[in-house]
Structure formats: structure tokens, C-alpha cells
Image (cartoon, rainbow, N blue to C red):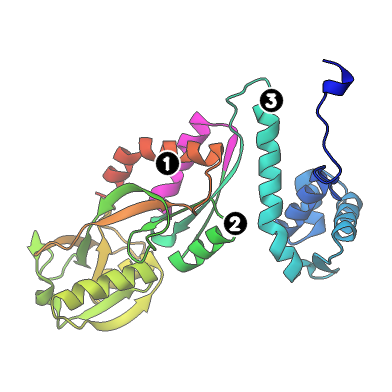
């Protein structure tokens, strides 16, 4: 091919050089996540001055202040800094994937996958998924946060999370999804409750007793919907978003609660025992889902979803 046959880009289509480096973005994210230049420097195995200089150069190239730096309070993200966090993460992740795609192993799948998990599902979903991903895809690093459905979906929409695990209750229909497992609500009472030896109970049998409400959006909505369908207005004595506190209050005889079926020991952290009873009539089954924003799924995220599908039998067993 002669020089005249080599395609060239016109000035209008040429990509301008980037005003920043990947190292500057790496330093920026390390400081954003740690809240301190000193802690970021330790993470990056760099000097404080090198990290500080990278941040200053990045701010100069972007024409924006990304941190408010105070000696006694560390480094706090500004509004502009918060805005570019998900963009910087995406650039670094795609840079890692680019390197892997032309490296020695074309099938290499590397980079972080960030998962948001409903508080009450974290102990069921995350540990075995992390182990499976480490075994099958050692180049992937699982990062996670817990919270309520609304905050997790908002984080996914901002690009801060790749996947969200939650019950189907309250899940908007527009999110692509796979089902992890199904479960049902059960009545939970203290082991010495008069109904504790029964296999099946009706909600009407406890309608006049005090209730302990697990006060998170998904659980609260499902519980109130179920009670309302049977014409019952619960007498709520205590509300808590803490799963184990809810169980402990029930174990002390302060009321009953409704919790999703879980393969848990009957013992509470408070040293009491519980009884899990099936409801008659049985409530609707509730799906446990893994969802993601409507964006093309990077290979590393698709790999994690493959692990989720492979673990379905284990998840089913863990939900009892």
C-alpha cells in the first residue's frame, strides 16, 4: 500500500488529545474514595506530593475545582468532583478492558464490578457470589454497597453501580433483570409463643397482637399489602430497619413480625429463639432479582451475571 492509499482523518474528524492522563484519574478516584490525599497515596504506593500534584494538574486541565482541601478535614468532593466520579470510573475500567483485549489472552475479563444489594439480602447474595467470581474470573474485583432500593437504583442511574440485587417489590419495570430465586413471607414469633408449634397459621390469629415492623421500603410495602389483602390493620409496636434487631425484639416476646423465608438458625443475637411459621392462605411468591440500567453490558458485568445464574440452586437453598 502506498502512502496515498493510507486513510487519513480530516481535521474535522480528528480526535483532540485528552487534557488529562489515566494516572491523574486514578489519583482522583483514590482521593475521592478515601477522603484524604495521604490515605490515597498509601493505596497507590505514591508520595503525598505526587498525588496532590496529579489532582492539581487534573483540576487545571478541566478548569474546575474537584476537591476542597483542608489540612484537618482531608479532601471533600465539590459538586464538579461528584459529577465526574462515575465518568472517571468508566474511563479507567474501559482502559483496563482495552489493554486486556489486545494482551496475551484475548478472553481476559478484568476490572471492577460494582453491585448494590438490599440490606436484608447482602448476607445471602454477596459472599458466595464474590467467591464464585474470584474462582471463575480472577481479573474481576467485586465492589459493593448496601442500602434501600431507591438509593441503589439512583446510584445505578448515575453510573456508580453496575448491578442491583433486590426483591421485586417496588422494582420499576424498565430495568433489565434476571431472577436469582423466589421466596415467600413467613410469620415469625418467639419460640414460646402459643402458635410456635403450629405448621400453618392465619394472619387473623395474630391480628390483635403487637407487631414489629422491619421498616425498609421493600419489606414495609410487602407487609402492609399482605395485611391489607386480609382486611387487617397491624398494631405496630416497634419499627426498625435493622434485620437482627427486628428478630431480637420478636424473640423477647414484644410482638410478631413478617419476614421473607430464609434458611436461618432460630437463634437471635440476643440469645432467644424464634419460630418461623408458614401462612395460610399462602402469600404470593416474591422474586429476588439482579437488575441493571438499560445500557450495553460490559464483558466483566456479563461474566458476573453468568456466575449469578450458576449459583441459583445455592441461592434457592439459602432462602429455605
Q: Nearer the observer, disc 2 or disc 3? A: 3
Q: Which residue lies furthest to the front in this view?
A: 4
- Majority SS type along the magenta span: helix
Residue assigned mark 2:
160
Residue assigned mark 1:
128
Residue 171 point in image, percent of width and height: 38, 62
Give the residue at x 73% y 53%. 29
Label 1 crowd bin: few (<14), some (14–19), many (20+), radius 10 Å? some
Label 2 sits on a secondary structure element that is loop
Residue assigned mark 3:
102
Quadrant of the image occupied by residue 62: bottom right
Label 3 sits on a secondary structure element that is loop
Residue 307 point in image, percent of width and height: 43, 36
Vertical arrangement, residue 315 with respect to residue 30, above or below: above
In this picture, which residue range is highlighted in magenta?
122-141
102 vs 230, left or right, is right
Quadrant of the image occupied by residue 121: bottom left
Amino acid at each position: 500500500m502506498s502512502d496515498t492509499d493510507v486513510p487519513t482523518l480530516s481535521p474535522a474528524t480528528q480526535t483532540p488529545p485528552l487534557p488529562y492522563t489515566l494516572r491523574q484519574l486514578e489519583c482522583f478516584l483514590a482521593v475521592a474514595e478515601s477522603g484524604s490525599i495521604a490515605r490515597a497515596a498509601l493505596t497507590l504506593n505514591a508520595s503525598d506530593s505526587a498525588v496532590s500534584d496529579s489532582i492539581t494538574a487534573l483540576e487545571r486541565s478541566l478548569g474546575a475545582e474537584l476537591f476542597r482541601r483542608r489540612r484537618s478535614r482531608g479532601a471533600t468532593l465539590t459538586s464538579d468532583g461528584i459529577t465526574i466520579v462515575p465518568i472517571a470510573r468508566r474511563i479507567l475500567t474501559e482502559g483496563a478492558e482495552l489493554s486486556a483485549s489486545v494482551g496475551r489472552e484475548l478472553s481476559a475479563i478484568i476490572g471492577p464490578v460494582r453491585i448494590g444489594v438490599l440490606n436484608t439480602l447482602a448476607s445471602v447474595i454477596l459472599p458466595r457470589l464474590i467467591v464464585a467470581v474470584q474462582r471463575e474470573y480472577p481479573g474481576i474485583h467485586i465492589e459493593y454497597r448496601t442500602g434501600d432500593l431507591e438509593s441503589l437504583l439512583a446510584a445505578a442511574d448515575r453510573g456508580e453501580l453496575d448491578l442491583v440485587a433486590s426483591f421485586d417489590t417496588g422494582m420499576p419495570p424498565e430495568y433489565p433483570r434476571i431472577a436469582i430465586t423466589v421466596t415467600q413471607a413467613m410469620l415469625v414469633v418467639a419460640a414460646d409463643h402459643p402458635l410456635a408449634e403450629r405448621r400453618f397459621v392465619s394472619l387473623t390469629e395474630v391480628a390483635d397482637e403487637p407487631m414489629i415492623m422491619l421498616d425498609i421500603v421493600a419489606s414495609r410495602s410487602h407487609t402492609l399489602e399482605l395485611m391489607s389483602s386480609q382486611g387487617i390493620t397491624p398494631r405496630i409496636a416497634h419499627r426498625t430497619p435493622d434485620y437482627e434487631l427486628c428478630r431480637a425484639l420478636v424473640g423477647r416476646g414484644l410482638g410478631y413480625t413478617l419476614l421473607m423465608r430464609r434458611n436461618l438458625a432460630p437463634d437471635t443475637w440476643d440469645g432467644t429463639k424464634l419460630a418461623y411459621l408458614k401462612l395460610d392462605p399462602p402469600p404470593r411468591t416474591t422474586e429476588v432479582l439482579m437488575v441493571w440500567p438499560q445500557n450495553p453490558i460490559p464483558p466483566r458485568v456479563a461474566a458476573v451475571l453468568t456466575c449469578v445464574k450458576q449459583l441459583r440452586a445455592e441461592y434457592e437453598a439459602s432462602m429455605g
